[in-house]
Image (cartoon, helix red, strand yellow):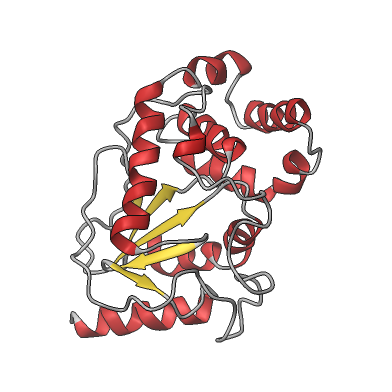
Amino acid sequence: MTHTIYSRTKTVTKKALKLGTMLAFAGFLSACGSGEDSASGANSGNTGTTQGSAHAAPVDAPEIAMGDMILGNSASPVTVIEYASMTCSHCASFHKHTYPRLKENYIDTGKIQFVFREFPLDTYALEASIMARCAGEERYFDVVSGLFERQEEWILPRTASKIRAAMRGIGADLGVTREMNEACQDNEAVQKRIAAKRNEAVNRYKVTGTPALVINGKLFEQGVGYNNVARHIEELLAANQ
């Protein structure tokens, strides 16, 4: 059983790299998912849906890139890529209801390889992603989980200064000091990488909303509830025995 985290990129930037050309700035907390709370009701086999409709054509197997944040078994025949925005309420729901069970039953047991890729829907999501990377590869997923768990705490203040202050406060609780974060926010190389991976998600996998799962190179469109995802993973594992 293998449990690995890979990260070779540096941490990212605060200067939104003219994100107006990179992001489709939809209002945060509503620019993600479809349906009511797409990842909740983890015991239901028919929970909400990921975005993007008629594109079921096979896609080449996903390539693991330098800077990808990865957990699980790199030798597994099943690779699950999650595209998520830190300000997306459906992504937060996924990380509260579905992800913990996937981690316990498939990632920690070495049955799958899990890749988390940032898909920022707004400036704050980008800055939160940068802050998570600032924590370093060993703490990256802890910061991501903390930001999703406490999402309302830092998003609901609504004003830019209060949102950023609350975000930094959560980062500090998780070991990312203000000084560390400020230094990271000035790294344009990582910001460009996040933009490139986001564009790849749109162009290669036809991702149009978050959370989106790409499983073995194909956009998963059966809903991101635990039962739906687990059933598909089991089918893929069985086919590779």
Q: Is residue 121 visible?
A: yes
Residue shown at the point (29%, 32%) measured from the top left: 8
List x then y, in percent, for residue 207: 41, 61
The reply, left or right, for residue 34 in relation to residue 165 is left
Q: Is residue 148 above or below residue 233?
A: above
Residue shown at the point (20%, 64%) measured from the top left: 61
The image quarter in which residue 187 lies: top left
Q: Is residue 222 above or below residue 120?
A: below
Q: Is residue 72 visible?
A: no
The reply, left or right, for residue 228 in relation to residue 163 is left
Q: How many marks?
A: 0
Residue shown at the point (44%, 70%) measured from the top left: 52
Q: Is residue 154 above or below residue 71?
A: above
Quadrant that contains the C terminus = bottom left
The reply, left or right, for residue 135 in relation to residue 79 is right
Quadrant that contains the N terminus = bottom left
Q: Nearer the viewer, residue 155 or 234?
A: 155
List x then y, in percent, for residue 230: 43, 78
Q: Nearer the viewer, residue 209 or 229?
A: 209
Q: Is residue 188 above or below residue 140?
A: above
The image quarter in which residue 154 lies: top right
List x then y, in percent, for residue 47: 59, 80
Residue shown at the point (45%, 32%) measured from the top left: 133
Q: Nearer the viewer, residue 222 or 169?
A: 222
